[in-house]
Image (spheres, rainbow, N blue to C red):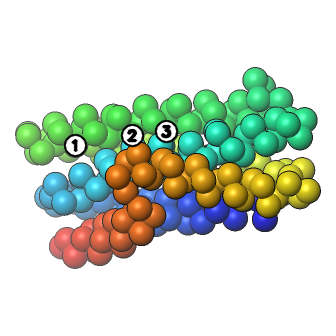
């Protein structure tokens, strides 16, 4: 199936979104959120989600769909590309707000950036899981094997450039979940 690896990424991203949701609640309760939670959050949102996962979609899935007759300058693919740009911009806001929070303990910007990020990415994943990927599965049936192989190759290339492995990010997500749950 041509979207299997992307759906697997979505599960990992959702796990991090849940940890971020819990972080928002903690910040609102006035709890102190340590660097050990904020730095992996920045790494994951900027590198795994943006560089690796969006790279796989933009360099493999969208071009394969274009070949299968879907336009990329309008319609669902264009919408997804605009969503990715916004995801990247909000992730940068999280980084700026984290720096400010760690320096001043003022959590207002960080809470806002995290809330906007969780909502935006949750909606984006829903659109892909329930709309775009359904279309992709139907249209790319005949080339699913090639698409799978290309997704695997781009993932490997992106992670290598980052000096990371997939299991690093799986561990990061588990650790994040655990660290957040231990704050009280
Ligand atoms: Fe996407
Ligand atoms: Fe995606």
Q: Position of residue 123 (x, y in %)?
A: 60, 48
Q: Position of residue 82 (x, y in %)?
A: 61, 30
- Between 8 and 96, the residue placed more toward the observer is 8
Q: Residue at x 39, y 40 (%)?
A: 91
Q: Which residue is mark 2?
A: 91
Specify whether tag 3 is near ligand 1 (CB below 8 Å).
yes
Q: Which residue is mark 1?
A: 98
The crowding category of the residue bearing disc 1, from other C-alpha atoms within 10 Å (few below 14, some 14 to 19, many at least 20), is many
Task: Determine whether 18 is above or below 82 in the image.
Answer: below
- Between 58 and 74, the residue placed more toward the observer is 58
- Between 74 and 183, the residue placed more toward the observer is 74
Q: Earlier in the sequence, mark 1 or mark 3?
A: 3
Q: Which corner quadrant holds the C terminus? A: bottom left
Q: Earlier in the sequence, mark 1 or mark 2?
A: 2
Q: Which residue is mark 3?
A: 87
Q: Residue at x 68, y 52 (%)?
A: 150
C-alpha span from label 1 to label 3? 16 Å
Task: Determine whether 94 is above or below 23 in the image.
Answer: above
Secondary element at tag 1? helix
């Amino acid at each position: 199936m041509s979207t299997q690896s992307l759906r697997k990424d979505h599960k990992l991203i959702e796990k991090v979104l849940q940890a971020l949701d819990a972080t928002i609640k903690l910040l609102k309760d006035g709890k102190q959120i340590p660097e050990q939670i904020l730095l992996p959050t920045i790494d994951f949102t900027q590198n795994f989600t943006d560089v690796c996962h969006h790279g796989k979609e933009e360099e493999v899935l969208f071009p394969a769909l274009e070949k299968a007759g879907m336009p990329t300058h309008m319609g669902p693919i264009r919408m997804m590309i605009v969503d990715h740009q916004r995801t990247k911009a909000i992730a940068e806001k999280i980084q700026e707000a984290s720096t400010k929070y760690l320096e001043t303990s003022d959590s207002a910007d960080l809470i806002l950036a995290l809330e906007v990020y969780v909502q935006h990415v949750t909606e984006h994943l829903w659109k892909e899981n329930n709309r775009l990927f359904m279309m992709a599965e139907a249209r790319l049936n005949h080339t699913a094997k090639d698409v799978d192989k290309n997704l695997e190759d781009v993932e490997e290339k992106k992670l290598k450039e980052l000096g990371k492995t997939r299991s690093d990010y799986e561990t990061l997500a588990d650790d994040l979940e655990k660290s957040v749950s231990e704050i009280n």
